[in-house]
Image (cartoon, rainbow, N blue to C red):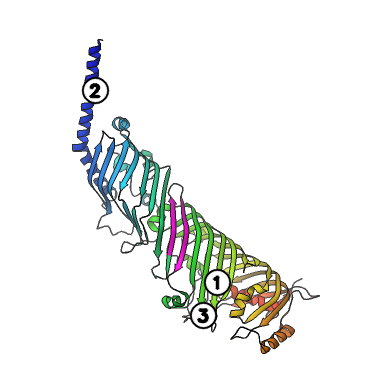
Amino acid sequence: MPFKAILRVLIYSAITVVVIFLCTQLSFTFYFDKKIKNDFREEVLNQSKGAYDLKIKNLSTNLFNQSIYISDFILQPDKSNHSNASKYFVTANEIHLVDFKLFPFLLRRDLIIARMELVNPSGNILRSSGGYEEPTKDSVKIFSIYSLLKKHIHSLSIIKIEVSNADFKVYDDYRDTLPSISSTDNELKISNLRINKSTDETRRLFIAEKVNLMINKFSYTTKDSLYSFLVKKLTASYTDSTLLLDSLKLVPNYSKLEFATEAGKQTDRMQISIARLDFTKMNVKLFFERNWFISKQLNIDNLNLSAYRDKNDADKPYRPKSVQQLLKTIPIYTAIDSINLKNGLIAYEEVAVGATKPGKISFNNVHATITGFTSDTMLFSKYNVLQINAACMFMNKGKLNAHYSFPLNTDEMVFDCSGKLTDMPMQAFNPMLETNANVSMKNGMIDSMIFSFHANEVASTGQMKLVYHNLKIELLNKKNKKAGAIEDILTYLAHRLVIKEENPSPGEPVRVAEIKYPRDSTRFIFNYSWKSLLSGIKPSLGLPGKITNSK
């Protein structure tokens, strides 16, 4: 074939391709873009059964630079939507789908996009106000993005999506005017997002290699205004099913002097800081939608908890809930198989009636495991028992191991407690005893204290074997917390007539004390546990109580 003929064919072919290309572009400009926009809106209304409305001002496809432009994107709940289900409100001034592959789109209707960019995005989540419901197939999948797209394309792939500094808010209830979580310092990263027929078959909105959300520096104030939660960084991964809270703090909004007055009763003032809170195998979607914590494991690193109570504050006696009742009444749905605490510090300060300074106790270097932690009564038959196993340094001196067991088939205050304290110098008790009991330990060493008791609504019963030596005490004046002549005489008589300076005494078997304490129904489990242990400690030291001799 002559060269001119070949050239003519090539020119005609090029002109044909250009004409087809121009016609295709014109068809998008004058017909398909508008149809796609209307089809999207109809599909959203159809799938949500009128609960949501989608508005798009402009949608334009440019085949020349291989991009799609969307302006004034708004997805919002219909005003007549008053259901208890979680609701979303999403907007963006502009959405750019940049550098899509032309021939897969034209030949196979496969839309492959290099990246997606958003201008001035915002997102609000209005959490569900309903209680927990077991998820069903119909409730898990309430929307299909594939059904939204399949009229116009076979599949959608976006290699990279990065959204920064979106105006992100979470509301606990649609009636709230202030969000529980608010952030404009955040970042969402999605890599290799895919939407195709298989996403529908697997009942998923989309498939992606990674979906990571990071929110920096946000806070939450409790509804009673007593506390604020401060979080340095929240990182959530939908694909890895993890949620990480970095540097979490619970901060009282009132001083120690003001707190009880603001609370309207005598109560503990708590202050908590945690270096790292890590949920694994967690349903991240339900956390943001409904504030539910459903996780296989929670790891807590470097907990620092301090509590303060002034018993001179006005007290309104009330019957505190049992641990079992507290679990059932947690205001957010919670189901965590295992909680692991590492390197914790728990400190308690209490100002006794008539005193001005607090007594102090501390549990240092706490390592603990908690299993069966859930607020769902339907799971109680599965977990059966809430168990706590802990090891720490008591007052940073003695080695303490303790075990708690709470049966979950009851609402009553029922539990079992056992443990062992070893190598504890008795002077370490003085920060609590000197201010609250007017007693000072001058010497003494606890070699071991082994205890076990069962507690219920009426009383606690059990046994304690407290082995110690070289006990020396000093009684203090109630006013100035010092020992005078009268206190010296009382101390001498106590050692001569009451106090046993060691266990076992020379030539005698180890004394085993009975733990028996009638419950004060106005006090919580910590007081119940301490008073139960005290009922065994007193007779071990020679004070009134029941003693048996070990064989």
Q: Nearer the viewer, residue 182 or 330?
A: 182
The residues colored magenta run: 229-252
Quarter of the image holding residue 481? bottom right
Q: Is residue 460 visible?
A: no
* Circle 2 or circle 3, nearest the eye: 2
Q: Earlier in the sequence, mark 2 or mark 1?
A: 2
Q: Position of residue 137 (x, y in %)?
A: 39, 49
> Where 429 sits versus 60, above or below?
below
Q: Is residue 293 left or right of residue 362?
A: left
Quarter of the image holding residue 171? bottom left
Q: Secondary structure at mark 2?
A: helix
Q: Nearer the viewer, residue 458 or 21?
A: 21
> Residue 14 got which mark?
2
Which residue is the site of mark 3?
311
Look at the image and tell me in which quarter the C terminus lies.
Answer: bottom right
Q: Is residue 489 left or right of residue 368?
A: right
Q: Is residue 474 visible?
A: yes
Given the image, on which type of amino acid does mark 2 rest? Answer: Ala
Given the image, on which type of amino acid does mark 1 rest? Answer: Tyr
Q: How far apart are the two marked residues, 2 and 3, measured between alpha carbons?
A: 92 Å
> Where 199 sits versus 121, above or below?
above
At x 58%, y 65%, the residue is 405
Q: How far apart are the two marked residues, 2 and 1, measured between alpha carbons?
A: 84 Å
Label 1 crowd (10 A; few <14 / some 14-19 / many >=20): some
Q: Position of residue 201 (x, y in %)?
A: 38, 41
Quarter of the image holding residue 109? top left
Q: Position of residue 376 (x, y in %)?
A: 46, 61
Which residue is the site of mark 1?
348
Q: Position of residue 127 (x, y in %)?
A: 36, 59
Q: Secondary structure at mark 3?
A: loop
Farthest-out residue, right = 507
